[in-house]
Image (spheres, helix red, strand yellow):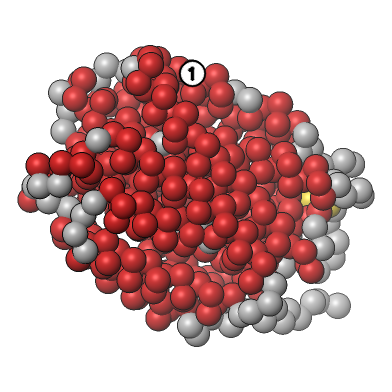
Amino acid sequence: MIQSAQKLPLRQLLIYGGLLVTLSMGIRHGFGLFNLPITSANGWGRETFALTIALQNLIWGAFQPITGALADRFGALKIMIAGGTLYALGLTGMALSTDALNFSLAGGLLIGLAQTATTYSVVYGILGRNVSAEKRVWAMGITAAAGSFGQFLMIPLEQGLLSSFGANDALLLLALMASLMIPIALMLREPNVVNTHQRGDQTIKEALKEAAGNPSFRLLTLGYFVCGFQVVFIAVHLAPYLKDLSFIYPEVGAPAVATTALALIGLFNIFGTYSAGILGQRFPKRYLLSAIYLSRSIAIMGFLWLPLSPMSTYIFAAIMGFLWLSTIPLTNAIVAQIFGVKYLSMLSGLVFFSHQLGSFCGAYFGGYLFDRTGSYSIVWNIAIALGVFAFLVNLPVKERAIHRVVPA
């Protein structure tokens, strides 16, 4: 078990944890802008790019519990430094790849592994060990809001890099930015971290068995699948969707519309995640999660049914942005509330694996079904139905701490 004799100052945690998440989440949020430039330049179908992003999300989810367990066991510093290095290497590989396999390995495998070490689960583990329970969900909300600001900041920046330098050089410049995660990680080093083992301490195996047998943990896991499906499908395929409909609604085909919409998602995500952190301190978090998922389905239905225009797109983006990552502090806070913080990075990683399975399906099947049918209609309807499903499965979640019998 990792313990720290001293606690990191709260301000330092929020600033540098927020910066790490800002870079990691912000860079990946703009990958949808590279979809058409890269596939057109290389003569690939959209399925190829979608498969890379889907693989990235699948690797991220599959290895997150392992990375989280290593961070819980040995400390997060080395994990975060390795993540920043892999992120820079992955972006460089994407820029230099001339065939689909190498592109998928760089953008899927390397960046997927990097994200396990530089995003919420590892950072939330540090927060859990250094922030009191009374302020924990608030601190998680602040960090998630920082990641949201990264999305807002990086979208216009990445579009500007694309317009000025082209896709390949833009990716190389983003690789330089990703390397900044390494010095940021050094600022999150927990002082005097030691491994402690006491009689009766829960082992990793026992923690996994306990979580797998907990009904609320399983329900949270199911709901998180839906979150991943919806947000990644929209992030990757909203820009191509608008471009496809430009022959009916010419004004939505301009690149600025998609760029502005994705930036608005990031902007309103700041308010949504911060609000989730505040509300999660006052109201049952399961009800807030259910409301978020149902509201997403309603927003998608409105977007599809109303006449399409730049303004309707911006309104949809603002609403979805407010609901975008607000599930993250609530879900992780419930996990900490039920199981404690000892294995928080690992258990959050397990729930997050389900999120990334959903992300894989949203990214890949968006491209797959479009290439087969010439339309995104089926996937939009799936996203609506899944939102209703997640609304229902989160209602019975029990947030109280689990009772354990400690051996004499």
Quadrant of the image for the C terminus? bottom right
**Does residue 189 sit above or below 305 in this rendering?**
above
Q: Residue at x 24, y 31 (%)?
A: 36
Q: Could you tell me residue 376's position as x and y percent?
A: 17, 53
Q: In this orientation, which residue lies closer to the viewer: 234 or 71?
A: 234
Q: Is residue 211 visible?
A: yes
Q: Is residue 348 visible?
A: no
Q: On the rendered structure, is 206 left or right of 262?
A: right
**Does residue 406 sit above or below 330 in this rendering?**
below
**Does residue 207 sit above or below 263 in this rendering?**
below
The amino acid at mark 1 is Leu
Q: On the rendered structure, is 74 left or right of 284?
A: right
Q: Residue at x 63, y 79 (%)?
A: 283
Q: Could you tell me residue 164's position as x and y percent?
A: 38, 16
Q: In this orientation, which residue lies closer to the viewer: 237 or 79?
A: 237
Q: Residue at x 27, y 41 (%)?
A: 239
**The residue positioned farthest toward the right in the image shown:** 5
**Does residue 364 sit above or below 385 in this rendering?**
above
| Residue 18 falls in image quadrant | top right
**Local secondary structure at mark 1:** helix
Q: Could you tell me residue 29's position as x and y percent?
A: 44, 40
Q: On the rendered structure, is 298 left or right of 126?
A: left
Local crowd size for mark 1, using a 10 Å CA cut-off: few (<14), some (14–19), many (≥20): some
Q: Residue at x 81, y 46 (%)?
A: 11
Which residue is the site of mark 1?
Answer: 173
Q: In this orientation, which residue lies closer to the viewer: 275 or 223?
A: 275
| Residue 176 falls in image quadrant | top right
Q: Could you tell me residue 52's position as x and y percent?
A: 31, 36
Quadrant of the image for the N terminus? bottom right
